[in-house]
Image (tube, rainbow, N blue to C red):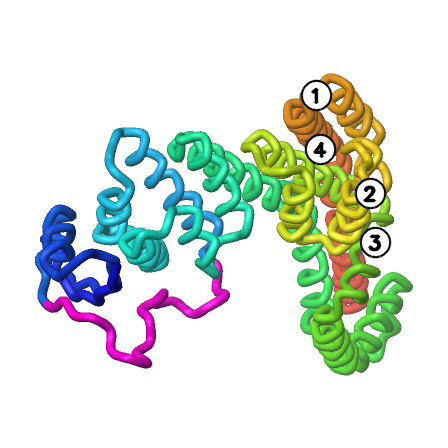
Amino acid sequence: MPLFQYRALRASGGEIAGELMAGDEREVAARLQALGSFPIEISLPTAGAPRLRQAAPAGRRLPPRELILFTRQLSALIGSGVVLDRALTLIAGGQGRAGSRALAGNLLAAIMRGESLSEACAAEPRLPRHYAMIIAAGEARGDTGAALDRLGEVLERSRATSRALLDALIYPATVLFAAVVSVAFLLGFVLPRFEILLSSLQREPPLPMRVLLTLSQAFQVAAMPAGLMLAAALLLLLLRYRDPRFRLSTHRVLLRVPAVGSLIGKLEAERVLHLLGQLVASGVELRSAIAVTREAMPSEASRAGLAISERGIERGDGIAAALAASTILPEMALELARIGDETGDVAPMLLKGGELLRREFEAASRELIGIITPLSIVILGLLIGGVAAAILSTIMDVYNFAS
């Protein structure tokens, strides 16, 4: 069956182009009209002509929020009984973001060429690998809508996990930043004015002010070189961060940081268990599920551990033994995996382990915030209050001297 190239107008007036496998030009026109589009040009591709593919740059993935919205829209349309090509046409011609509309257009073109949705998603560089695998499992069961629902849940959980640690630490980090900026302003701009005043009076300031003036002088001398050295160190770190071995060592060091490392470890373990459990529950073969989970992990430490687990599955180990060899999961999660091995309910046990770890993280993060928040406020108050007290005592000393 030949592959035709076409250009058509949507009912809204926008123009689309793509490829469609059909018996003849009349069939192409009929299928386009059934989708609510009006053919402008239909032709067989000439020899050597490039195939029409995605309009966005290759390898550039959609932002998580946009991908979640696209998945939920497609799931709602399919669940309402709208056929797949019509659902993609509605999204592509809607008022959504350009990335979602372009993705829908690319998938629609692939569907019109006779590909399945999972094949189209697997060839789309802007989609993660597990996206196509979960859809393929749904297609095998004849329930693409349920697969899209599961995908929406996976994507939303992954985004929530990514933001969880940031949300837990953003307030303490904000207070620390405010403290650094305030102290730098006082040392760099306020205290030098007092130094000029005291020099004009030819009077030795009180001890607290002498200490602050010494710090101010050191700050003025060292601030610029220190800033340049910090910028150079950050640039070097970014360059080195491209090396997987350096990323692996960095991520392992982060996991050993007191308090924060434990939170990061719980988040990574929760991410592993939830995605792996969802893939297994979707019907993905265990070795492939671990391989896809490994690719989806942002942490090189988790990737290295899952690579060990993947080799264990290849040797014939059970899921619990393979995950235990990775050393990235806590004992509680491993015990649930052992129960899943024994009962045959691997996916529910993995998902339950992920849920328990999520609750542990939420409790630990609340406890950490409860300690860090008042402590950071007290430290900031002591810093600013100490400087203010020294300035005030100096002002009073100068006033008494002038009187």
Looking at the rendering, which quadrant does residue 346 occupy? top right
**Residue labelled with disc 3:** 252
Q: CA distance from mark 1 to mark 4?
A: 28 Å
For numbered disc 1, what is the local secondary structure?
loop
Q: Position of residue 365 (x, y in %)?
A: 71, 35
Whether the magenta-drawn stretch holds residue 319 is answered as no
Say which of 336 and 183 sits in front.
Answer: 336
Q: Which residue is mark 1?
A: 344
- Front one among 145 and 220: 145
Mark 1 or mark 4: name the one nearer the start of the chain: 1
Residue annotated with mark 2: 315
Tell me the kind of residue under disc 1.
Gly
Mark 4, secondary structure of its residue = helix
Please report the residue visible at 43 percent of the width from the left and 37 percent of the height from the top: 139
| Magenta region, residue range | 41-61
- Give the distance between the C-alpha atoms of the residues marked 4 and 3, in whole angstroms: 19 Å
Q: Secondary structure at mark 3?
A: helix
Would residue 46 be found to the left or right of residue 71 on screen? left
Mark 3 vs mark 2: give the one in front: 2
> Of callouts 3 and 1, which one flags the residue occurring earlier in the amino acid sequence?
3
* Residue 51 lies in the magenta stretch: yes
First along the sequence among labels 2 and 4: 2
**Residue 44 seen in the current view:** yes
- The picture places residue 132, in percent across and down from the top left corner, at 49, 47
Q: Quadrant of residue 300?
A: bottom right
